[in-house]
Image: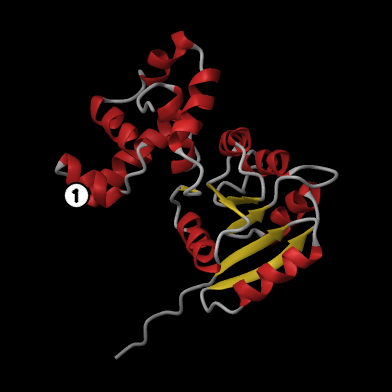
Amino acid sequence: MNASPAVEPIRVLLVDDEGLVRSGFRLLLDAEDDITVVGEAVNGADAVEQTRVQRPDVVLMDIRMPTMDGIEATRAIASTPGLQDVRVLILTTYDTDSYVFEGLQAGASGFLLKDAGPAELLHGIRVVAAGAALLAPRVTRRLIAQFATRRAANGTAEARLAVLTGREREILALVGQGLNNDEIGAKLFLSPATARTHVSHAMGKLGARDRAQLVVIAFQTGLVTP
């Protein structure tokens, strides 16, 4: 019987201006069989350059750093051709709603607080590496919605959604509520594969790089409300 092919570990780049923080994360991550640290960066500019060279699967990104902060670095990574498959997971000590919104708008796939436990951090890396969105439990959807709807022009929501079919609108709303493909399928009596296809179509039509961007769009256009 043929052996199953080895699964490539999730490649992670650590970005933080504090060496002790990076060392702690490295010790935790290197102890996992399915995760490997491919580099460390001390600021946002360094992170962008190392991401271009290393092509990690996930960038663990601090926000407040010298030279270039984590939000700008995330925006640069998300807009760089060839890096569309890199996922950014923002880690910060600042439980501030504006940081969450700005990070997701810039292209981050998730957001966790630095005081999250080891299990929560490892789970977060695996979730965003798989292409899903991740929000820290203490960062509520209600507050993200307030920032998103405040910045959206009232007359543009319908025009933005006009590219979607009725089914895709339904699915966008459910993505915004945090449902995964299995849950969406069960709710709409679709197979998970069909739900995934609709999600992919919505992402392409709306120019969203991942599910986290769909969450923001769902709030901005009023499909999801507090």
Q: Quadrant of residue 106?
A: top right
Q: Using residue 203 as the reference point, say whether residue 139 is left or right of it.
A: right
Q: Which of 6 and 132 lies nearest the eye of the viewer?
A: 132
- The residue sitting at the bottom extreme is 1
Q: Quadrant of residue 3?
A: bottom left
Q: Quadrant of the C terminus?
A: top left
Residue at image location 36% in from the left, 43% down from the top: 178
- The residue sitting at the left extreme is 189
Q: Secondary structure at mark 1?
A: loop
Residue at image location 36% in from the left, 28% down from the top: 224
37 over 224 or under it: above or below: below
Q: Is residue 179 visible?
A: yes
Applied colour scheme: secondary structure
220 over 138 or under it: above or below: above
Residue at image location 53% in from the left, 72% down from the top: 9
Q: Quadrant of the N terminus?
A: bottom left
Q: Which of 185 and 96 lies nearest the eye of the viewer?
A: 96
Residue 202 position in % (x across, y down): 37, 34
Residue 115 position in % (x across, y down): 61, 58
Q: Using residue 218 as the reference point, say whether residue 91 is left or right of it.
A: right
- The residue sitting at the top extreme is 155
Q: Which of 136 and 199 lies nearest the eye of the viewer?
A: 136
What amino acid is at disc 1? Ser
150 over 22 or under it: above or below: above
Residue at image location 80% in from the left, 51% down from the top: 43
Residue 68 position in % (x across, y down): 80, 42
Residue receiving disc 1: 191
